[in-house]
Image: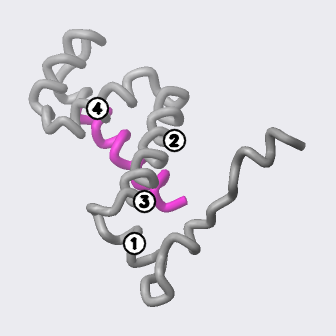
Amino acid sequence: DDAAKQFSFISLNDLISDSVSLDCLVEDPKNPINEVISSMILDSLLAELKEWKPWASEMLCFFLAGKQQEAICYFGRKYHISPQTVRKYRRQLSEYIQTFLLR
């Protein structure tokens, strides 16, 4: 097939030297492979959170941005709930994420 001849297959193993393992590359936070993996995990988590609870993915975005206090006010106003309920949601979100990461 002519279209298949236009593309080549490159293995990640071919891109690294024999003295470096793929595990070492993934552990390095500055490595582009790690950025891709992190992005894929985050995308998957956000998709699951949207199906789990309507507020969960939005709350995660607040926390990743370091805006915990703003989240309490925002979700309280948006969903007409108390700060205690927002904190309860935050705990539920934390438990869900921990379960997600252990899979």
List the residue tagged with mark 4: 61
Q: Which residue is mark 3?
A: 33
Say whether residue 49 is left or right of residue 10.
left
Kind of residue indicated by mark 2: Ser
Label 4: which secondary element: helix
Q: Quadrant of the C terminus?
A: bottom right
Q: Which tag, 4 or 1, sits closer to the chain's start?
A: 1
Per the image, label 1 sits on a secondary structure element best described as helix
Q: Are marks 1 and 3 in contact (CB under 8 Å)?
A: yes
* Amino acid marked by disc 3: Ile
Estimate how packed mark 2 is, as few (under 14), some (14 to 19) or many (20 or more) residues with alpha carbons within 10 Å. Answer: few
Q: Is residue 70 above or below residue 25?
A: above
Tell me how far mark 4 sits from mark 2, CA to CA.
14 Å
Give the number of the mark in front: 4 or 3. Answer: 3
Disc 1 marks which residue? 25
Q: Nearer the viewer, mark 3 or mark 2?
A: 3
Magenta segment: does it hold 91? yes
Mark 4–mark 3 Cα distance, whole angstroms, equals: 23 Å
Residue 23 location in percent, x, y? 45, 76
Q: Report x, y in % for residue 44.
A: 51, 41
